[in-house]
Amino acid sequence: MSNPDGLEGVLAPILTPFANTLLPHIPLFVGLARHLMEQGLGLAPFGTTSEGNSLGVSEKVTLLDALAEAGLEMGRMMPGTGCCALTDSVALTAHAVRLGCGGVLMLPPFYYKNPSEDGLFAAFAETIERVGDARLRLYLYHFPQQSQIPISHALIERLRNAYPETVVGIKDSSGDLANMVEMCRRFPGFKVFAGTERLILPVMQAGGAGC
C-alpha cells in the first residue's frame, strides 16, 4: 500500500449514498469523497457510518475502483474490510492493497459470540497470511457495542508481536477514553484512532493518531 505511515488526523467515515434501485450511487459517492478530501480529510469508507455491512463485497470493490479511477489519493483511505466470512475479508483486503489504500480497518468476525482469544488471533492471522502482501497495513476495529466482540490488549500484543509491520493501529469506537489512552501508553508507535471527533484532542495528546 502506498504511504503506509501517512494515515493520521481525521478520516471521514463517508456516507454511502444509494439510488432508488437500492444500489450504491457511484457518482454521488465519488463526488462526496472528492469534496471531503479537498477539505484535507482522509476517508474511512465501509465502516459503521458507511453501512459497510449492508454492502456486498462486489459493491465495495466497485466503489473502491470508482475512487481509484477518479484519481483520488488512495493512500489517504482506510476502508473497512472485515467480514464474517474469511474469504470475503481476504478478497476485499487484497483488493484494497492492490489499489494502494493506506490501510484497512478490520472488524473481528462478529456473528458467533464469545470467541476465544486464540480464535480471534487465528482469524486475523489467517487473513494476513492469505493476503500475503508486505504492503498491507491493518488497523483493528474495536466497537464492542456493535460487534459484541471486544479486542483485548492481550490480543493486540500477540498480533503486534507476530506481525509488527502489518498490524499497525486500531480504531476504538467504544467511547472509552481510558482504554484509548492506555493503548497509547502501552503500545508505543501503535496508531490509535478515536471513533469520534469528541475524543480526538485527548487521544492525540496521549500520543494517538486521530479519529
Image (cartoon, helix red, strand yellow):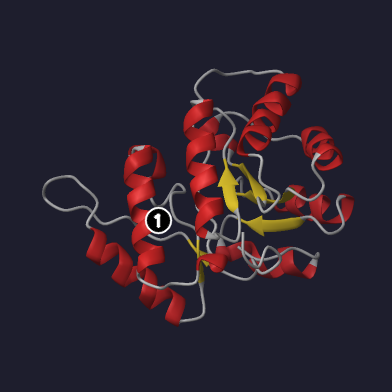
101 versus 86 height, above or below = below
125 versus 1 height, above or below = above
Which residue occupies the extreme bottom position in the image?
A: 39
Q: Give the residue drawn at x 49%, y 37%.
A: 91
Q: Is 79 displayed left or right of 17 in the figure? A: right
Q: Is 55 displayed left or right of 22 in the figure? A: right
Residue to which mark 1 is pinned? 64
Q: Give the residue drawn at x 75%, y 47%.
A: 179
Residue 62 visible, this orientation: yes
- Marks counted in the figure total 1
The N terminus is located in which quarter? bottom right
Label 1: few (<14), some or many (≥20) within 10 Å?
A: many
* Residue type marked 1: Leu
| Residue in the foreground of this view, choosing between 25 and 182 | 25
Residue 143, by quadrant, is: top right
| Residue in the foreground of this view, choosing between 85 and 8 | 85
The C terminus is located in which quarter? bottom right
Indicate the position of residue 3 as horizontal and vertical percent values. Answer: 65, 68
Indicate the position of residue 34 as horizontal and vertical percent values. Answer: 37, 74
Q: Give the residue drawn at x 25%, y 59%.
A: 26
Q: Is 98 displayed left or right of 123 in the figure? A: left
Q: Give the secondary structure at mark 1.
A: helix
